[in-house]
Amino acid sequence: MSDAPAVKAHWKIRKPTVTGTDGMVASQHYLASQAGQAVLAAGGNAIDAAISTGLMLSVVEPWMSGLGGGGYMLIYSAARDEVFQIEFGMQAPQAAMPTDYPLAPGQISASDAFNWPKVEHDRNVHGPLAIAVPGYLRGIELALERFGTQSLAELIEPAKRQAQLGLPLDWFACQKISQFARGLRTYEATRNLYLQDGLPPAADSEGLITYLPLPGLAETLATVQQEGADGIYRGSLTQSIVQELQAAGSKISATDLEQYEAIVSSPLSGRFREHQLYTAGPLTAGPSLLEALTHYGQTAIPEASNNTSYVAMAKALQTTYQNRLENLGEGATDGSTTHICTADRHGNVVSFTQTIMSAFGARIHLPTTGFLMNNGMMWFDPRPDGPNSVVGGRRPLCNMCPTLGRSPDGSWFAVGACGGRKIFPSIFQLIIFLTDYGLSLEDAIHQGRIDVSGTDLVTLMDNLPQSTIEALERAFASTRIRPNDVSPNFFALPQIITRSPQGLLEGGCFIPSPHALVASIA
């Protein structure tokens, strides 16, 4: 048998940052960024742009987020000189009980969930009992009512038009459907939509964009234009949503939808060096971000060499994740979250994360309304009587971590990421690159990173200097080197926008996402 070396791909990719003065949007899909850009160009503010961008993402990246999910939004209001948080995470149905999720025999950890014990048949990961009450439309409607300038009906229009056209099927979208086809085929309505002839769709051989029809979704968005979020939660669509959920075996009731409330609150805040940070609240990865920066700040100095500081970063992440696992109960997931950053000419800055949890959520597609449901029950500990156990009406822990930062000179940055457990380690390092390292934004977004997210394993991006790799390998017993590749991705995919005191905006989207785009208003 031959001992021939494995073939490796070597990519050298840079995606330049973008500048502007009158507004900016950064997201994981160019069509979504362009939708937000158009809102800014028409006079909308950063909150309006974030909402329009997010709605478009729900159409063009349905495996990441959508009407059946939830999220967190941080808003810096320049007029009030204050940061606000909009909370609209998923919530357990009132009828949910721990007995719905019996543990599988043996000491097995769930493969697609947090580091909880495995549940029989993965019923908290996919299927009807994995679905939590969604908060998405309630959340964006509240953000718009409190801080926006345009109507929800206006901001939905680009997403509705795209839904009428369909899901763009380029190579990346086809790859996503193919990657998860085995799970999608389990449920009839989802199989009928994404695997129409029993196979995943194929990208056009000439590179042309074709479209997968999305029955019902445009009509749902049109109803929301008329009725607002009430159309889903207590209006003309509620009965069909509840009937289809309960027919599938979900415990979500009309009362669950009617009683769901999004919340305006104050974010967590803390300091790193001279910089004031604002991040999402206690049910997110925000507390872990602030804790990791505190550990790092106590052991590393800005003048330290890259090798020394990378070791300090890894140790801070290990210490923080140990506390996270033991005291917050959260563990590992490769969730399919997406993130948006926006800024406008008035000085408002937004960091917005939305999700349906795992790729394609619970894999339950509602054929009448045309959207996928989340698998937010995966966030709960299936063991009873714990701080994050299943309790009817409870909201679980999550990995989302939208963050804003203010520097002593009055500049701001908005940062966030998709990537499950890898989210906060990536944001943690970006903050260090911009502050301790003093890197330009373009250099920061291409700086090699590491991932430490719940185990002793330290994953090293293969573009790190060799001396840094060797220093980390000496310091830690378990390391691996991986590329920052399209699939699988080992390091999360952040977006970031900075705003100078003079109003100059600069934004970056991380490689290797093929769709990500920063769109600006000059």
Image: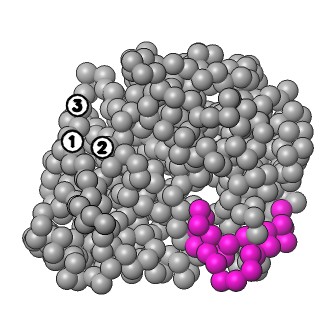
Callout 3 secondary element: strand
Q: Where residue 260 sits in the image (x, y, percent)?
A: 76, 48
The mark that comes first in sequence, 2 or 1, is: 1
Disc 2 and disc 1 in contact, CB within 8 angstroms: yes
The mark that comes first in sequence, 3 or 2, is: 3
Residue 517 seen in the current view: yes
Amino acid type indicated by mark 2: Ile
Q: Which residues are magenta?
A: 96-119
- Give me the residue at 23% from left, 61% from top: 4
341 versus 31 height, above or below: below
The span from disc 2 to disc 1 (Cα, nearest Å) is 7 Å
Disc 3 and disc 2 in contact, CB within 8 angstroms: no
Where is mark 3, residue-wise? 19
Residue 346 colored in magenta in the image: no
Where is mark 1, residue-wise? 13
* Residue 158 as seen in the image, left or right of residue 119: left
Callout 1 secondary element: loop
The mark that comes first in sequence, 3 or 1, is: 1
Where is mark 2, residue-wise? 511
